[in-house]
Amino acid sequence: MDIAKKILLVEDDTSLAQWVSEYLVEQGFDVALCQRGDEAVQAVKKHNPDLVLLDLMLPGKDGMSVCRDLRVFYHQPIIMMTAKGDEIDEVLGLEVGASDYVIKPVRPRVLLARINAVLREKQGSSDSSSDEINIGSLQIDTLSRDVFMDKQKLALSNAEYSLLYFLASNADQILDRDSVFLATKGREYDGLDRSVDVLISALRKKIGDDPQSPSKIKTIWGKGYLFVSQAW
Protein backbone atom coordinates (compact mmCIF):
# COMPACT_ATOMS: atom_id res chain seq x y z
CA MET A 1 0.00 0.00 0.00
CA ASP A 2 1.27 3.45 -0.88
CA ILE A 3 2.04 5.75 2.04
CA ALA A 4 -0.35 8.71 2.10
CA LYS A 5 1.16 12.00 1.02
CA LYS A 6 1.29 14.50 3.88
CA ILE A 7 0.03 18.04 3.35
CA LEU A 8 0.56 20.90 5.78
CA LEU A 9 -2.33 23.35 5.52
CA VAL A 10 -1.43 26.84 6.78
CA GLU A 11 -4.79 28.59 7.06
CA ASP A 12 -6.34 30.73 9.82
CA ASP A 13 -9.94 30.55 8.59
CA THR A 14 -11.29 27.74 10.77
CA SER A 15 -14.27 26.80 8.60
CA LEU A 16 -12.19 26.81 5.40
CA ALA A 17 -9.42 24.82 7.05
CA GLN A 18 -11.96 22.24 8.22
CA TRP A 19 -13.54 21.57 4.84
CA VAL A 20 -10.21 21.58 3.01
CA SER A 21 -8.75 19.16 5.56
CA GLU A 22 -11.77 16.86 5.46
CA TYR A 23 -11.88 16.88 1.66
CA LEU A 24 -8.17 16.11 1.30
CA VAL A 25 -8.36 13.33 3.88
CA GLU A 26 -11.24 11.83 1.86
CA GLN A 27 -8.93 11.94 -1.17
CA GLY A 28 -6.31 9.89 0.67
CA PHE A 29 -3.99 12.58 2.02
CA ASP A 30 -2.63 12.94 5.54
CA VAL A 31 -3.30 16.56 6.58
CA ALA A 32 -1.72 18.62 9.37
CA LEU A 33 -2.94 22.12 10.22
CA CYS A 34 -1.14 25.31 11.23
CA GLN A 35 -3.14 28.52 11.77
CA ARG A 36 -0.40 31.14 12.20
CA GLY A 37 2.23 32.39 9.79
CA ASP A 38 4.84 32.81 12.51
CA GLU A 39 4.46 29.12 13.44
CA ALA A 40 4.57 27.75 9.89
CA VAL A 41 8.33 27.20 9.62
CA GLN A 42 8.42 25.14 12.80
CA ALA A 43 5.34 23.22 11.64
CA VAL A 44 7.10 22.31 8.39
CA LYS A 45 10.17 21.15 10.29
CA LYS A 46 7.97 19.11 12.64
CA HIS A 47 5.74 17.43 10.05
CA ASN A 48 8.11 17.32 7.04
CA PRO A 49 5.16 17.44 4.59
CA ASP A 50 5.23 16.45 0.93
CA LEU A 51 3.42 19.70 0.10
CA VAL A 52 2.50 22.96 1.86
CA LEU A 53 -0.84 24.61 1.12
CA LEU A 54 -0.21 28.19 2.26
CA ASP A 55 -2.68 31.02 2.77
CA LEU A 56 -1.46 34.53 1.92
CA MET A 57 -3.13 36.50 4.71
CA LEU A 58 -2.11 35.00 8.05
CA PRO A 59 -1.72 36.25 11.62
CA GLY A 60 1.85 36.66 12.84
CA LYS A 61 3.51 36.62 9.42
CA ASP A 62 2.11 36.90 5.89
CA GLY A 63 2.29 34.03 3.40
CA MET A 64 4.82 35.78 1.14
CA SER A 65 7.31 36.02 4.02
CA VAL A 66 6.58 32.46 5.11
CA CYS A 67 7.19 31.17 1.58
CA ARG A 68 10.47 33.06 1.37
CA ASP A 69 11.60 31.66 4.73
CA LEU A 70 10.63 28.11 3.78
CA ARG A 71 12.56 28.18 0.52
CA VAL A 72 15.80 28.51 2.49
CA PHE A 73 15.54 24.83 3.42
CA TYR A 74 12.28 23.34 2.09
CA HIS A 75 12.36 21.98 -1.46
CA GLN A 76 8.92 20.36 -1.75
CA PRO A 77 5.96 22.04 -3.52
CA ILE A 78 4.26 25.09 -2.00
CA ILE A 79 0.83 26.12 -3.27
CA MET A 80 -0.28 29.59 -2.20
CA MET A 81 -3.99 30.10 -1.59
CA THR A 82 -5.54 33.54 -1.31
CA ALA A 83 -8.71 35.52 -1.83
CA LYS A 84 -6.74 38.18 -3.66
CA GLY A 85 -7.03 38.11 -7.44
CA ASP A 86 -4.48 40.80 -8.20
CA GLU A 87 -1.95 39.54 -10.75
CA ILE A 88 0.80 41.41 -8.87
CA ASP A 89 0.19 39.17 -5.84
CA GLU A 90 0.32 36.13 -8.10
CA VAL A 91 3.62 37.17 -9.66
CA LEU A 92 5.14 38.01 -6.27
CA GLY A 93 4.01 34.68 -4.85
CA LEU A 94 5.64 32.76 -7.68
CA GLU A 95 8.78 34.89 -7.51
CA VAL A 96 9.35 34.13 -3.81
CA GLY A 97 9.23 30.42 -4.54
CA ALA A 98 5.62 29.23 -4.68
CA SER A 99 5.10 26.27 -7.00
CA ASP A 100 1.57 27.32 -7.82
CA TYR A 101 -1.07 29.84 -6.85
CA VAL A 102 -4.79 29.18 -6.29
CA ILE A 103 -7.45 31.86 -5.98
CA LYS A 104 -10.24 31.60 -3.41
CA PRO A 105 -12.99 30.56 -3.42
CA VAL A 106 -11.41 27.32 -4.54
CA ARG A 107 -13.50 24.54 -6.01
CA PRO A 108 -12.49 21.19 -4.52
CA ARG A 109 -11.75 19.53 -7.88
CA VAL A 110 -9.54 22.43 -8.97
CA LEU A 111 -7.59 22.36 -5.71
CA LEU A 112 -7.14 18.60 -5.98
CA ALA A 113 -6.00 18.90 -9.59
CA ARG A 114 -3.36 21.47 -8.67
CA ILE A 115 -2.11 19.43 -5.73
CA ASN A 116 -1.83 16.28 -7.85
CA ALA A 117 -0.15 18.20 -10.68
CA VAL A 118 2.65 19.65 -8.56
CA LEU A 119 3.15 16.34 -6.76
CA ARG A 120 3.41 14.55 -10.13
CA GLU A 121 5.91 17.14 -11.31
CA LYS A 122 7.98 16.64 -8.17
CA GLN A 123 7.71 12.85 -8.41
CA GLY A 124 8.71 12.96 -12.05
CA SER A 125 11.80 14.93 -11.11
CA SER A 126 12.68 12.44 -8.36
CA ASP A 127 12.14 9.40 -10.57
CA SER A 128 14.16 10.71 -13.47
CA SER A 129 17.73 9.46 -13.59
CA SER A 130 18.93 12.69 -15.17
CA ASP A 131 16.33 15.03 -13.62
CA GLU A 132 16.16 16.75 -16.99
CA ILE A 133 13.91 17.28 -19.96
CA ASN A 134 15.91 17.43 -23.18
CA ILE A 135 14.20 18.44 -26.42
CA GLY A 136 16.58 19.40 -29.19
CA SER A 137 18.52 22.47 -28.08
CA LEU A 138 16.32 22.88 -25.00
CA GLN A 139 17.37 21.52 -21.61
CA ILE A 140 15.21 21.85 -18.49
CA ASP A 141 16.72 20.92 -15.13
CA THR A 142 13.65 19.99 -13.10
CA LEU A 143 15.46 20.07 -9.76
CA SER A 144 17.13 23.48 -10.02
CA ARG A 145 14.42 24.79 -12.41
CA ASP A 146 17.20 26.11 -14.65
CA VAL A 147 16.53 26.23 -18.40
CA PHE A 148 19.18 26.21 -21.12
CA MET A 149 18.89 26.77 -24.84
CA ASP A 150 21.94 26.03 -26.99
CA LYS A 151 23.78 25.66 -23.65
CA GLN A 152 22.94 29.26 -22.75
CA LYS A 153 20.94 29.75 -19.55
CA LEU A 154 17.62 31.52 -20.00
CA ALA A 155 16.48 34.07 -17.44
CA LEU A 156 12.91 32.96 -16.75
CA SER A 157 10.50 33.99 -14.03
CA ASN A 158 8.84 31.24 -12.01
CA ALA A 159 5.63 31.79 -13.97
CA GLU A 160 7.48 31.48 -17.30
CA TYR A 161 9.27 28.34 -16.09
CA SER A 162 6.00 26.72 -14.98
CA LEU A 163 4.41 27.41 -18.34
CA LEU A 164 7.42 26.19 -20.33
CA TYR A 165 7.68 23.06 -18.19
CA PHE A 166 4.00 22.26 -18.77
CA LEU A 167 4.26 22.84 -22.52
CA ALA A 168 7.48 20.83 -22.87
CA SER A 169 6.08 17.99 -20.76
CA ASN A 170 3.22 17.76 -23.25
CA ALA A 171 5.23 18.35 -26.42
CA ASP A 172 3.42 17.91 -29.75
CA GLN A 173 0.00 17.90 -28.08
CA ILE A 174 -2.51 20.70 -28.55
CA LEU A 175 -3.27 22.03 -25.06
CA ASP A 176 -6.53 23.92 -24.70
CA ARG A 177 -6.72 27.13 -22.68
CA ASP A 178 -8.55 25.47 -19.78
CA SER A 179 -5.79 22.90 -19.25
CA VAL A 180 -3.05 25.53 -19.54
CA PHE A 181 -4.79 27.82 -17.06
CA LEU A 182 -5.49 24.96 -14.67
CA ALA A 183 -1.87 23.78 -14.82
CA THR A 184 -0.22 27.20 -14.53
CA LYS A 185 -2.77 29.40 -12.78
CA GLY A 186 -4.73 26.99 -10.64
CA ARG A 187 -8.03 28.04 -12.15
CA GLU A 188 -10.05 27.53 -15.29
CA TYR A 189 -9.99 30.02 -18.15
CA ASP A 190 -12.68 32.66 -17.67
CA GLY A 191 -12.78 33.75 -21.31
CA LEU A 192 -11.19 37.12 -20.61
CA ASP A 193 -7.87 36.65 -18.79
CA ARG A 194 -4.95 37.29 -21.18
CA SER A 195 -2.13 36.60 -18.69
CA VAL A 196 -1.13 33.30 -20.32
CA ASP A 197 -0.95 35.04 -23.69
CA VAL A 198 1.40 37.57 -22.11
CA LEU A 199 3.58 34.75 -20.73
CA ILE A 200 3.58 32.98 -24.11
CA SER A 201 4.71 36.21 -25.77
CA ALA A 202 7.48 36.69 -23.19
CA LEU A 203 8.67 33.09 -23.64
CA ARG A 204 8.79 33.46 -27.41
CA LYS A 205 11.01 36.51 -27.10
CA LYS A 206 13.40 34.70 -24.78
CA ILE A 207 13.69 31.61 -27.00
CA GLY A 208 13.97 33.61 -30.23
CA ASP A 209 10.66 32.42 -31.65
CA ASP A 210 9.27 34.71 -34.34
CA PRO A 211 6.15 36.32 -32.78
CA GLN A 212 4.60 36.83 -36.22
CA SER A 213 5.17 33.24 -37.33
CA PRO A 214 6.23 31.16 -34.31
CA SER A 215 7.61 27.69 -34.93
CA LYS A 216 8.42 26.50 -31.39
CA ILE A 217 5.34 27.54 -29.42
CA LYS A 218 2.38 27.85 -31.74
CA THR A 219 -1.06 29.26 -31.07
CA ILE A 220 -3.66 27.01 -32.64
CA TRP A 221 -6.58 29.36 -33.10
CA GLY A 222 -9.76 28.16 -31.45
CA LYS A 223 -7.95 25.22 -29.83
CA GLY A 224 -5.00 26.31 -27.70
CA TYR A 225 -1.22 25.99 -27.79
CA LEU A 226 1.25 23.56 -29.33
CA PHE A 227 4.87 23.01 -28.26
CA VAL A 228 6.65 21.71 -31.40
CA SER A 229 9.52 19.42 -30.42
CA GLN A 230 11.01 19.22 -33.92
CA ALA A 231 11.52 23.00 -33.99
CA TRP A 232 14.12 22.98 -31.21
Image: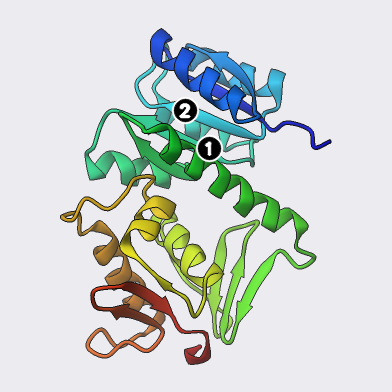
- Which residue is tagged 1? 78
The residue that appears at 69% across and 51% down in the rendered structure is 123
The residue that appears at 48% across and 44% down in the rendered structure is 114
Category of crowding for the residue at label 1, using alpha-carbon neighbours closer than 10 angstroms: few (below 14), some (14–19), many (at least 20): many
* Residue 76 sits above or below residue 35 on the image: below
Q: Position of residue 227 (x, y in %)?
A: 44, 78
| Disc 2, SS | strand
Contact, mark 2 vs mark 1 (Cβ under 8 Å): yes
Judge whether residue 13 can be spotted in this image: no
Camera-nearest residue between 27 and 45: 27
Q: Quadrant of the N terminus?
A: top right
- Which residue is tagged 2? 54
**Going by the image, does 154 lie left or right of 189?**
right
Q: Position of residue 27 (x, y in %)?
A: 60, 30
**Going by the image, does 195 lie left or right of 51?**
left
Query: In which quadrant of the rendered view does residue 30 lie?
Result: top right
The residue that appears at 43% across and 32% down in the rendered structure is 108
| Disc 1, SS | strand
* Residue 21 sits above or below residue 206 on the image: above
